[in-house]
Amino acid sequence: MRKIFVLDTNVLIHDPNCIYNFRGNDIILPIFVVEEIDKLKRNQNTAIQARMVSRVLDGIREKGSLARGVELPNDIFFKVEIKNDISLLPKALSRDVMDNNIISVTLGVKKENPDRRVIIVSKDINMRIKADSLGLEVEDYNTDRVEYSELYDGFFEVDVNKELFDEFCKSGKIDFEAIEDKKGIKPTPNCFFKLNYKGQMVSGRYVDGKIKKFILGDTEAWGLRARNEEQRFAMELLMDENVKVVTLVGGAGTGKTLLAIASALELVVERKRYKKILIARPIIPMGKDLGYLPGSEKEKMKPWMQPIFDNIDFLSENKEDKTGEKVVAGLESMGMIKIEPLTYIRGRSIPKGLIIIDEAQNLTPLEIKTIVTRAGQDTKIIFTGDPQQIDNPYLDANTNGLTYMADRLKYESIVGHITLKKGERSEIAEIAARLL
């Protein structure tokens, strides 16, 4: 039987085209959602998505009456519901709260369709709890969901016999198919293998059916060398110009941002392989927002970009005692580096550049797509983030854009991914990341 899905505002903001993913079912959009979308157009963090939603809804309106309902592709029926019987709400729930009005519309739809499943789809946990407590069926929007616990690490460990181990050490490569115990592994382009023979370990990179030794992982980038095997894998991908998109996922202190910035400085400033570095991160606060900051654009951005300066500080310790801000200022004056919020990236085309997107776990899949499509000819993009530390209220480890992209692009030959696990910041940082 066809189900009736009632969409919450946050689902549309997360994916403006989500309406077309409910194949063979009916969709009800409460009029209150349209009002919320209009308000979100004035919010800096949601303005772009809200306008996209409005355009999608207007496109549907041109096909028929939203009040009577519109037949859409994939056997979807879409309708905007304006009827709201507020008496269906318990008196304990305020009539002034938008979520409660969406729930009351849903209760009305359920009353009119007692024999059909009526389901609220929301990415707001509290909305789902509240609706469920009133006897309504609720679901998260799972179309672009990727189970973070099942996300591949970008490397595998396999046992090999003495002949294969010796062949790899001597010739620098072996055929993947020659490994007897593959453990059901399906290798992806640019993944890595740890080859183990009785406690002896060597590593290689998977390329065109073969596992080959690699050398870029041991490169010194702006004075920095990898400290563990996972960082070696990351450095190999970061320094390889043929790998156009790199995703680095890891907990606090694993070195993902530091490695990205060091490789970028090495490739742009020292080796002149790219024209400039563009570093950007989403403007989402942890905890209570401090509101508008005084000063020029650069002064407003300084608190948000301080983690970038901290990393460049660390890398600049042996370079004439310059601070990160001085290094950035010098490179900015030469047009070699630009640090800015992600707000300004839409509409741009960035050729021959190296783009670093830090804290990418706070981005939606749509925002990730927007960023990747900015890349021009000979541009490399590096995404770093920790899906366990998300400040965006409508995302989690399974639905953020970083996890989604790492999973969806893993079979592309110009894409590489590594999950960094070993903390290198300090002993206390490693203990905290592991135990707290």
Image (cartoon, rainbow, N blue to C red):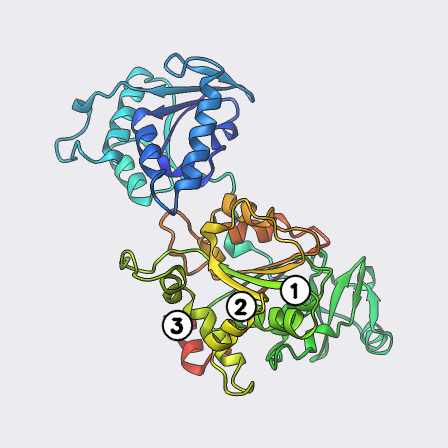
- Residue 392 in view: yes
Q: Secondary structure at mark 3?
A: helix
**Quarter of the image that includes the C terminus:** bottom left
Q: Secondary structure at mark 2?
A: helix
Dot 3, how many residues are within 10 Å of its Cα: few (below 14), some (14-19), or many (20+)? few
Q: Nearer the viewer, residue 189 or 82?
A: 82
Q: Nearer the viewer, residue 432 or 186?
A: 432
Residue at x 50%, y 46% (from the top left corner): 367
For label 1, the residue is: 155
Q: Nearer the viewer, residue 159 or 83?
A: 83
For label 3, the residue is: 435
Please indicate whether residue 163 sits to the left or right of residue 268 in the image: right
Alpha carbon of mark 3 to alpha carbon of mark 2: how far?
Answer: 40 Å
Please indicate whether residue 48 sits to the left or right of residue 405 in the image: left
For label 2, the residue is: 332
Residue with the most extreme left position: 91
Q: Give the mark nearer the N terminus: 1 vs 3.
A: 1
* Kind of residue sitting beneath label 1: Phe
Q: Nearer the viewer, residue 91 or 46?
A: 46
* Kind of residue sitting beneath label 3: Leu
Please indicate whether residue 373 sits to the left or right of residue 436 in the image: right
Alpha carbon of mark 1 to alpha carbon of mark 2: how far?
Answer: 36 Å
